[in-house]
Amino acid sequence: MKCPPLLLCLGVGRRRFPIWLPLFLLWPLAAAVIIVLAPLVLLAALILWPLGWGKPLLLSGPLFFDVFCALRGLEVNLNVGNRLMLISFK
Amino acid sequence: MSDNQKRILDLLAEKKISVDEAQRLLSLTEPEKDTGAGRPEESAGSGGKPRYFRVQVQPEAGSGKESVNVRIPMALIHAGIKLTSLIPDQASDEVNEALREKGVNFDVRNLKPEDFDELVAALTDLEVDIKGGKEKVHVYVE
């Protein structure tokens, strides 16, 4: 089962220790927004279906969720001297 | 001695592969043997599906150049390819036309997620080492 990333580790500049952001705290908020917007998206998809944009609109949600879940494990670490840039999804 | 091992030794004798490459290939044909201090990135080649695409740039000590360490999940690349299905046909035509203008003769509709699995399997033994100037570049999958 796919699981979105739980934590985002950010480190920029001369910080010795990176910041850990708890992404899991955003999940309930995101779920609420999705529930509220779902009827609007369905309505928009029905209206745009003859123009060929209905199917992409309906599929975009699950596909972007797949992309978000696939971010787990992404790590970018740049070091220049004593400055660093770190982005890591756990 | 298996056919694969014999073929590897033949390639080494013909100097078509180096000693390091032969050693690595032989270790892949015998996963039950202890390979000693094997590099972690070889785990993808010993039967496991590669999960990450890695790019490392390591400068020489004291050179002052930046070091880069990037790890990209294969699942992210796979999900990105699936996003191309969102492109409507009209937009696909425009994208293809723009690519052709730049000299890239490629149809974005040919990108299919099922082809990705085949590509990932082919990347299992990918390893690129570039040593030049004051930096070492290492590209591999694990």
Image (cartoon, coloured by chain):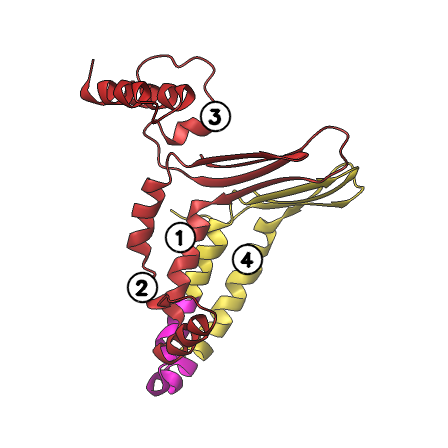
Chain colours: A yellow, B red
- Using the numbered discs, state the Cα–Cα distance from disc 4 to disc 3 in whole angstroms: 37 Å
- Give the residue drawn at x 38%, y 74%: B92
Q: Chain of mark 4?
A: A
**Mark 2 residue type:** Asn
Q: Which mark is residue B78?
A: 1
Which mark sits nearer the N-terminus, 2 or 1? 1
* Pair 3/2: label in front: 2
Which mark sits nearer the N-terminus, 3 or 2? 3
In this figure, which residue is indicated by the disc labeled 2?
B110
In this figure, which residue is indicated by the disc labeled 3?
B40
- Using the numbered discs, state the Cα–Cα distance from disc 1 to disc 4 in whole angstroms: 27 Å
Q: Alpha-carbon neighbours of circle 1 within 10 Å: few (<14), some, or many (≥20)?
A: many
Residue A7 on image: x %, y %? 59, 45
Q: Alpha-carbon neighbours of circle 4 within 10 Å: few (<14), some, or many (≥20)?
A: few
**Mark 1 residue type:** His
B37 magenta-colored: no
- Using the numbered discs, state the Cα–Cα distance from disc 3 to disc 1 in whole angstroms: 23 Å
Residue B88 on image: x %, y %? 37, 76
In this figure, which residue is indicated by the disc labeled 4?
A28
**Mark 4 residue type:** Pro
Q: Chain of mark 1?
A: B
Mark 1 in CB contact with mark 4 (< 8 angstroms): no
* Pair 4/3: label in front: 3
